Image (spheres, rainbow, N blue to C red):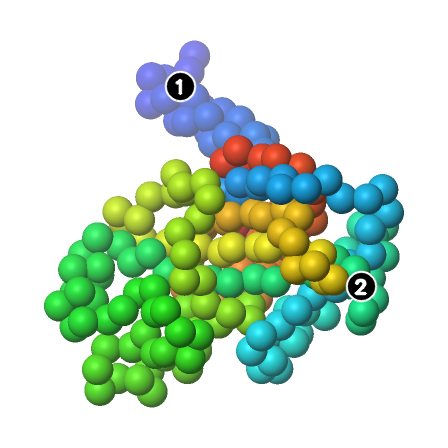
Amino acid sequence: MIRPVSRVAAALLFCVLSAGALPARAQWMGELSGTVMHPLPARPTFGVVIYDDTEQNLAFRRAFLDALRRSGYQTGDDAPYVFSFATSITWKAKREREIQSERVRRYPVERGEGTAPQGREGDVADNPETRMFGDRRTTPPLVAPRISNIERDRLDISVTLRERASSKVMWTADLALPLLEEDRDRIVRSIIGPIIQTIGRDADHEPFEVK
């Protein structure tokens, strides 16, 4: 005869084992929205333009080009179609109020302007808003993100694909993800795949895992 306590313990053990058998759900999710401006040719060749050629940004360029090649795309230094990337941070509500009080300009007009509170310019050297992938975003996204900034800061990334010869914008993407920490490698791991999978098509708030 099984005692009641043993019966409860057995039930709890069953629940634990059953839960362990289920696939783990991603704890943090980002989203991507894409907009086609002009159709791309059947077999385009891509390049990546980096406006701020720090070693980290150049490493990102190499990683993105390598991922393009592994996905079957052609790449080249003088490719007719080029990607560029720009980032900004939407601070969580409390921090946003603090920043306003410190008179920080979130979206500077000129590329060279700083975004640090006055007297703290040296603190932003590793900040993702400091041209994380080559440039700082200065305009709102085409598609407003749904990722909340109530609890956590949000990293916003704009991707632009242009025709090199004419500078005509062919395709854009806007990504948003929780800024859990200033971990560039984690962000890179999370965004490259979703961007490449969406090249040249419209997308509406498609989710992706923050790995």
Q: Residue furthest front?
A: 166
Q: Amino acid at mark 2?
A: Ala
Is 183 placed above or below 175 here?
below
Is 10 placed above or below 207 here?
above
Whole-angstrom CA distance, mark 1 to mark 2, is 68 Å
Q: Quadrant of residue 120?
A: bottom left
Give the left or right position of residue 45, taking residue 13 as reference.
right
Is 40 placed above or below 14 here?
below
Which numbered marker is on residue 79? Answer: 2
Residue 14 in sight here = yes
Counting from the top left corner in percent of width and height, residue 128 is at: 44, 69
Counting from the top left corner in percent of width and height, residue 106 is at: 30, 65
Counting from the top left corner in percent of width and height, residue 185 is at: 57, 66
What's the residue at 36%, 69% (across, down)?
109
Counting from the top left corner in percent of width and height, residue 93 is at: 21, 53
Which numbered marker is on residue 7? Answer: 1
